[in-house]
Image (cartoon, helix red, strand yellow):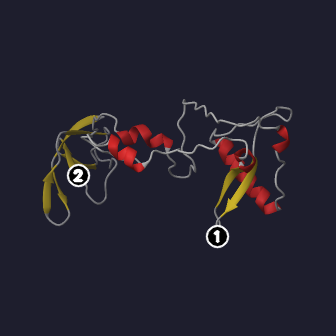
Amino acid sequence: MQNVQLCPHHVGKGISTYAPANATTPADTHARANADALHPQYCVAGSTSVICKMTIPLRRSPSMDDLVRPAFAFGEQPLGKIKGHDIELYLDVERPYPPVLRRPPYPASLETRKEIEKHINELLDMDAIKKIGHNEIVEITTPVLITWHYGKSRLCGDFRALNSYTKADRYPIPRIPHALDKLAKAKYITKMD
């Protein structure tokens, strides 16, 4: 590798610009290194010109986007998740949840069963669920496949039987006047979706 000094280059129609700093190219200066076809930068090493693309690394502190990005779904992964954080949920129940209410899977066509298996395999690959043995006793729910008119589907759990055993939370979210009273002396108000 050798360092080369960047010279003026053209961007668009007759607009000359100067690229700052130094760039590094392979020892063979006749080679084209990572050339950008639309906006080439001409570098000079001695008397030999080469076309190269310079990348300047930026140092910055992590932003909120960097911190929460792993928790959201992007690309082919259908679900986001935060690794390393276990969450325990507590439900107030009026009486114990009897094993009698655990239901067998609903009848499904061959096509629906294949779709359910596909969703389960995706969740296994993402480590969102884990496989259990045949003799393990685990309180689970019956999987239900919800299909939309445009062909996509989603795997859900049927928790309707559990609803009759949980105590109702009459005020799960704060009332609007109470929330506005708390914001009365606020200097900054932000919103995160």
Instruction: Pick whichever, 28 or 1, lies toward us.
Output: 1
Q: Do the residues labelled 1 and 2 touch (CB within 8 Å)?
A: no
**In the rendered structure, which amino acid carries the disc numbered 2?**
Gln
Looking at the image, residue 60 sits to the left or right of residue 17; the answer is right
Instruction: Pick whichever, 177 or 116, lies toward us.
Output: 177
How far apart are labels 1 and 2 at the CA level? Answer: 51 Å
Residue appearing at x 78%, y 62% in the figure:
111
Give the percent coordinates (x, y) of residue 90. Answer: 62, 33
The residue that mark 1 highlights is 149
Looking at the image, residue 98 sits to the left or right of residue 66; the answer is right
Numbered label attached to residue 37 = none
**In the rendered structure, which amino acid carries the disc numbered 1?**
His
Crowding at mark 1 (Cα within 10 Å: few <14, some 14-19, many 20+) = few
Vertical arrangement, residue 124 with respect to residue 86, above or below: below
The N terminus, quarter of image: top left
The residue that mark 2 highlights is 41
Q: Quadrant of residue 116?
A: bottom right
Give the percent coordinates (x, y) of residue 32. Answer: 32, 49
Q: In which quarter of the image is residue 63?
A: top left
Residue appearing at x 21%, y 47% in the figure:
43
